[in-house]
Amino acid sequence: MNQDYALIRRLMLANTRIDGAYYFFSRRLGIKENILTLLYALDDGAPHSQKQICRDWLIPKTTINTNVRELVDAGYVMLYSGAGTREKTIGLTDAGKAYTEKMMKRVYEAEQAAIEKTLRRYSAEFVEAMDYFADCICSEFQNRLAEETHD
């Protein structure tokens, strides 16, 4: 096994453990992982379309549709018509903001503690490096798929 392969494998395992940590934490909170992710996305206060959330957070459209419907039925989310488009914007209701704050409080506390520990040991550039690696791997996979369709 060459050194690059070992590094990539460690990175992928770390990423899987991070995803798993959010999954198990959401289960302990009593909510679906994708609903936690949706609340996370909406908690920045900015308007988001379902399409944008699907793209940014890599959640399948059917899953987002189901989760949005559940949150609308619970009174936590409202759908707003976009100007000149059929795409609806998703926003938290006041009850949704209170629910999100309750659900995300421990998530944000855990994240804050983890980033503080990490920054004591590493520079903040590790986040930039992870973001760059994500861009590179997405681009490389797209290139390989494009090559495959041309063969």
Image (cartoon, rainbow, N blue to C red):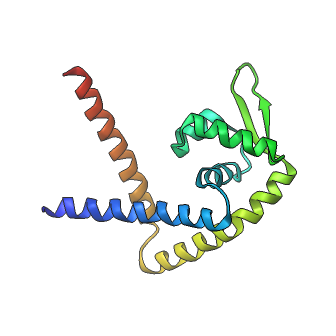
Q: Residue furthest left?
A: 1
- Identity of the residue drawn at 40% across and 58% down: 130
The reply, left or right, for residue 118 in relation to residue 107 is left
Q: Visible in this render: residue 47? A: no
The reply, left or right, for residue 78 in relation to residue 49 is right
Q: Visible in this render: residue 69? A: yes
* Residue 127, horizontal then vertical, whole percent: 45, 62
The reply, left or right, for residue 93 in relation to residue 140 is right
Quadrant in the rendering for residue 85: top right
Q: In the displayed structure, would residue 65 be above or below residue 105?
A: above
- Identity of the residue drawn at 38% across and 58% down: 129
Q: Nearer the viewer, residue 34 or 44?
A: 34
Quadrant containing the C terminus is top left
* Residue 24, horizontal then vertical, whole percent: 55, 65
Quadrant containing the N terminus is bottom left
Q: How many marks?
A: 0
- Identity of the residue drawn at 59% across and 67% down: 25
Q: Nearer the viewer, residue 22 or 56?
A: 22
Quadrant in the rendering for residue 36: bottom right
The reply, left or right, for residue 105 in relation to residue 118 is right
* Residue 33, horizontal then vertical, whole percent: 59, 55
* Residue 59, horizontal then vertical, whole percent: 54, 42
Q: Nearer the viewer, residue 30 or 76?
A: 30
Quadrant in the rendering for residue 82: top right
